[in-house]
Image (cartoon, rainbow, N blue to C red):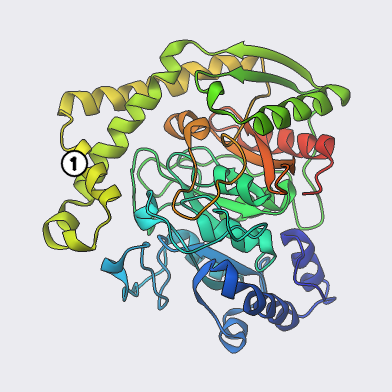
């Protein structure tokens, strides 16, 4: 049995006794053994015997999952992408990891992250061309799913760290509404903007994972509970009839490569052919000014989070973290509080647009994955939605002239994750994905 199965397909085969968990895990581990010498998606992977010992009955029985290396895993190294934590082994699982295990899933390994989910990259490469970045900060998770080693991986996004690598690697990346997925046990970059999300190879797979792993009660600060999705192992998402999209003109459109402009136009054309209604709109400037407020939040919170690292472990920190914290230390309490207020107010105000549109259409990145492994790409096209906490999803569309994946981004209303995923399923079918 080929290891490159979708999440739901693998779950169905295992539940129907048509595929043994051991055989599936063995095929995934074998593929990892073949690819990892060049891919470098993992810092630690289980052996087959270790993986089989973790598997037990449940909706995720026998399913290997990649866990971003800022998310705590009991008994398994969690380095946060930093030499400071090179030997750190947590005493307990992050909430979402505990849930994966409870459902029978197998924590196959820890995937490469940039340092503390910020800019300093790890060794992971793009599965489509090892000379290109897989994106960041959830580098290894995107690469592991795109290469077929796992059908599901966890990532995190504070600006663009799920959707951008998903686009670069040609998979689906889903970031739910802020607070809809448990974050306890993940090392923070910015508590005001951090999200935990999912990499899969289809929208239905992302929806299935989200349904199982989202909050089912609000037990963490800032957490919300969104309604369950009408999806199961045996049934797919329903699609949206005659979707209406707002294609956004942004202040950053000049940053898009010609290829990315063409991909967005291609998607728009395919959507219109399938009966989508699309308006081109510009958001008021006040929303885009929110990105400056987002920088205030991230930098200020990083200054607090890393104050002990700077005091005691400065030599082991990259210049990126030091500069982030230095910038954060210069904000006043008034500036920080105003940024938090703006975040809440703008999140509520933008909801008015979704009374008219099913979702926004934009891009997840400026273009294809950059050449080289020293830069993971610009998150600017994802940043506002992370600041506002809106659900967003990246879908692959086609490949560039350099044979690298390129995609689009759909954004939904806060708390309306189910509707966004149904919209994305409709878009996925219209695009006839085959990246």
x, y (%) of residue 227?
61, 40
Compared with 23, 43 (above or below) is above
Q: Quadrant of the N terminus?
A: bottom right
The crowding category of the residue bearing disc 1, from other C-alpha atoms within 10 Å (few below 14, some 14 to 19, many at least 20), is some
Q: Residue furthest left?
A: 311
Q: Residue furthest bottom?
A: 49
Compared with 238, 95 (above or below) is below
Label 1, secondary structure: give it.
Answer: helix
Compared with 109, 310 (above or below) is above
Q: Residue at x 80, y 44 (%)?
A: 433
Q: Residue at x 26, y 45 (%)?
A: 302
Q: Which residue is mark 1?
A: 326
x, y (%) of residue 19?
81, 77
Q: Is residue 106 visible?
A: no
**Viewer-side residue, 392 vs 18:** 392
Q: Residue at x 22, y 52 (%)?
A: 306
Residue 159 quadrant: top left
x, y (%) of residue 423?
73, 33
x, y (%) of residue 194?
41, 44
For this view, does 24 lie left or right of residue 157? right
For this view, does 126 lie left or right of residue 79? right
């Amino acid at each position: 049995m080929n290891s490159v199965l979708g999440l739901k397909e693998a779950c169905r085969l295992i539940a129907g006794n048509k595929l043994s968990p051991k055989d599936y895990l063995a095929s995934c581990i074998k593929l990892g053994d073949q690819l990892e010498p060049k891919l470098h998606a993992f810092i630690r992977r289980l052996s087959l015997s270790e993986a089989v010992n973790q598997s037990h009955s449940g909706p995720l029985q026998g399913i290997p999952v990649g866990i971003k290396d800022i998310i705590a895993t009991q008994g398994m190294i969690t380095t946060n992408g930093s030499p400071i934590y090179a030997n750190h082994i947590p005493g307990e699982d992050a909430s979402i990891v505990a849930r994966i295990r409870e459902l029978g899933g197998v924590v196959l390994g820890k995937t490469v992250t940039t340092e503390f989910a910020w800019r300093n990259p790890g060794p992971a490469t793009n599965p489509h061309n090892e000379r290109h970045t897989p994106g960041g900060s959830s580098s290894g998770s995107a690469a592991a799913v795109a290469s077929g080693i796992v059908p599901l991986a966890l990532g995190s996004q504070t600006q663009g760290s799920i959707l951008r690598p998903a686009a670069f690697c040609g998979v689906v990346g889903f970031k739910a509404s802020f607070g809809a997925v448990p974050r306890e046990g993940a090392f923070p970059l910015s508590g005001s903007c951090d999200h935990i999300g999912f990499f899969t190879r289809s929208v239905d797979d992302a929806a299935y994972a989200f349904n199982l792993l989202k909050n089912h009660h609000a037990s963490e600060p800032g957490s919300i509970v969104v309604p369950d999705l009408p999806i199961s192992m045996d049934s797919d998402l329903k699609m949206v009839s005659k979707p209406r999209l707002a294609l956004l003109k942004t202040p950053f459109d000049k940053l898009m490569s010609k290829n990315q402009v063409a991909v967005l136009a291609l998607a728009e054309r395919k959507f219109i052919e399938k009966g989508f209604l699309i308006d081109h709109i510009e958001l008021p400037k006040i929303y885009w000014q929110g990105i400056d407020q987002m920088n205030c939040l991230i930098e200020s919170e990083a200054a607090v989070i890393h104050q002990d690292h700077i005091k005691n472990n400065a030599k082991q920190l990259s210049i990126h973290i030091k500069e982030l914290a230095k910038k954060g230390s210069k904000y006043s309490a008034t500036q920080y509080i105003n940024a938090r207020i703006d975040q809440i107010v703008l999140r509520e105000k933008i909801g008015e647009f979704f009374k008219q549109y099913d979702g926004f259409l934009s891009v997840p990145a400026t273009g294809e994955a950059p050449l080289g492994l020293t830069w993971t790409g610009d998150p600017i096209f994802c940043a506002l939605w992370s600041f506002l906490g809106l659900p967003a999803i990246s879908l692959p569309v086609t490949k560039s002239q350099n044979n690298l994946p390129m995609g689009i981004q759909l954004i939904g209303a806060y708390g309306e994750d189910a509707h966004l995923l149904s919209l994305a399923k409709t878009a996925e079918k219209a695009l006839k994905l085959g990246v």
